[in-house]
Image (cartoon, rainbow, N blue to C red):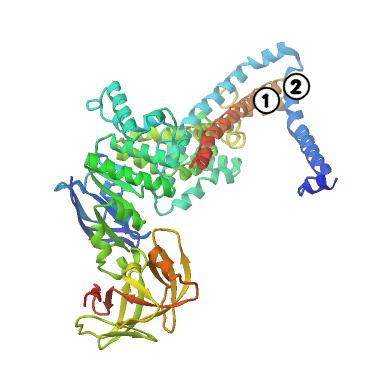
Amino acid sequence: MSKSKSTLRIGDQPWVKWSLIGSALALVLLLLVVPLILIFAQAFSAGTESLWVNLTDTYTLSAIGLTLLVAAMTVPINLVFGVFLAWLVTRFEFPGRKLLITLIDIPFAVSPVVAGLLYLLLYGSNGWLGSWLMDQDIQLMFAWPGIVMVTVFVTCPFVARELIPLMQQQGREEEEAAVVLGASGWQLFRKVTLPNIQWALLYGVVLTNARAVGEFGAVSVVSGNIRGETNTLPLHVELLYQDYNVAGAFTSASLLAGIALLTLLVKSFVEWRQARQRAPESDQADSL
Amino acid sequence: MSIRLEGINKYFGQFQALKDISLDIPDGQLTGLLGPSGSGKTTLLRIIAGLETAEQGRILFHDQDVTALHVRERRVGFVFQHYALFRHMTVAQNIAFGLEVLPRAERPAAAQIRRQVADLLDMVQLAHLGNRYPSQLSGGQKQRIALARALAMQPQILLLDEPFGALDAKVRKDLRRWLRALHDELHFTSVFVTHDQEEALELSDRVVVMSAGKIEQVDHPQALYAEPESRFVFDFLGHVNVLDGTLRNQRVVQGEAWVTLPGDLNCAGEVQLYLRPHEVRLQDCPAGHAHLPLQIESISLIGAEVRLELTPCGWQAQEPWEVGISHVEFNRWQPQRGDRCYAVPDVGHLFDVQRSHPRTLSWVDG
């Protein structure tokens, strides 16, 4: 008995362990699992036929199309931007570098609604740039370009945030080795840098995509909610709900939830691959 | 291919890393850049490679100015301290990299590349590891692969940045011997950076000693050890016993200690007498030309000779003295810790205030 007592470490008391596990499980169930099940239950509540009708509704289809378009434009833009930024701050020393790393986080710190308002103020028909654009007959706000712009803003830190710590840790020695061996800038990026960061990059892309699909606040401000034109899927859910079309709202919501689940799946896979990529390096310490 | 550096100056912000460095590295030799950390030796190596650019100065390979040439065009082999193997490529892919990135017109055929990689793997005696990834190799194996990768381009200049720094002592010794053999066989011009005096003296044809961004001395290992030109080189190359004292009437005096100098020296004032551990004998009574009372502090038996650490009695020294005696002599004499004895210099090196170079003195044969 004295033996079992001495092997207990701090916090190992069974009642502490089980009450912690119990409360964590209860919270997850209450806050995450039940609402998720409810979404799908509500979507199917009026039968599969009505689900199909709701799904193939013109406005719903157009909302799906616009959401996919926004994601399809946002992800490549932020992919390129993120890689560029991460490369810049990890491979070059310049005044203001630390400041730039801090500035990358602004979209995380600012409420999306505020971001939307800022864009409206700047590019709206009465805005500083907007009035000039209006004269050129270019409309950004209350149209899809505006939605893409605010989505790009809101999601721009994801890729850079994933890459910067990794590229800092990997250092530039491999890149220097490649250049000494005669690699051109493009060969260097394609054959050395990209393979080293590919999983972190994919991880950033998955997060960017999830957020681009689900963004509500900023998009809501600049969209104007024109059905069939500037309505994205999250906005569509809200509109349908306000129209008392609960089944319709939950059908669209279940689509978003489905995308979220898919994202989680891809994210776990990428995390697993990243862990596997790092694992052999811990072996090397033993064999040295 | 010979390397010539002319008036190299390099700044990092306000800090001057290299101060007006001029150096000739002859064709086919193995040259060691030796210095403590922060002396600028790695920066100098990276400037030769083209990985850093100097603010001033010229670099010539075989009398051709390559200062403005991009690192990609310089065609040097470079071995990094931490190997810098491409972690997502196999060993064979790593070695083939330099050939694979050649422009299509110059690139050998795939079969030819495979053959060359196999030859290089044979040369570094790791033919069985071609399909492994770098993370599956030991440090010594990684360093060999890094070398094979650098040699794949058949460079005429091979630059190595602390090539053995991250390896344990046994592997380091093996690799050192192997690199020397390889160099003698292939005859490229090699420059390697090290902070290990023993490594530099053992491996190099010539050693460049650097400190604080300047070259202190360039010489053959034997000459460097026998005739260091400055206090820094003296202190840096192994242990040295120092007597600080006042020179008056041919005699250096400090407290109870004194040494009469041979020959005819017409100088006086504050001087330092530097004595290497093997240039001093120990006796149980003072000699006619020296009175240096010491007490035995510790005895180290491991090695080819017995090392005694001694503290001065009745005079001062910044660091304890070290003297080596043979095991035969140790067994005959059988000194104990705490015993008192007297040091007798055979050869010494005198520094005075006016001159940065030492005068070598000898008490043997008159």
The correct choice, above or below, for A74 with respect to A112 in the image is above
Chain of residue at mark 1: A
Residue B79, given in percent of the width and then of the height, sits at 33, 43
**Residue at the disc numbered 1:** A253
**Quadrant in which the N terminus of chain B appears:** top left
Q: Is residue B189 visible?
A: yes
Going from N to C along the chain, the mark reached first, 1 or 2, is 2
Q: Which residue is painted at 43% across and 42% down in the image?
A: B139
- Quarter holding residue B317: bottom left
Residue A77, given in percent of the width and then of the height, sits at 46, 33
**Quadrant in which the C terminus of chain B appears:** bottom left
**Residue at the disc numbered 2:** A42
Taking depth in this image into account, of B156 and B40 the one nearest to the observer is: B156
Task: State left or right for residue A124 relative to residue B227.
Answer: right
Secondary structure, mark 2, is: helix
Q: Give the class, few, some or many, for how many residues have Cα within 10 Å of label 1's Cα (few <14, many ≥20).
A: many
Inspect the image, locate mark 1, and give the three-letter code of the amino acid beneath it.
Ala
Q: Are marks 1 and 2 in contact (CB under 8 Å)?
A: yes
Label placed on residue B363: none
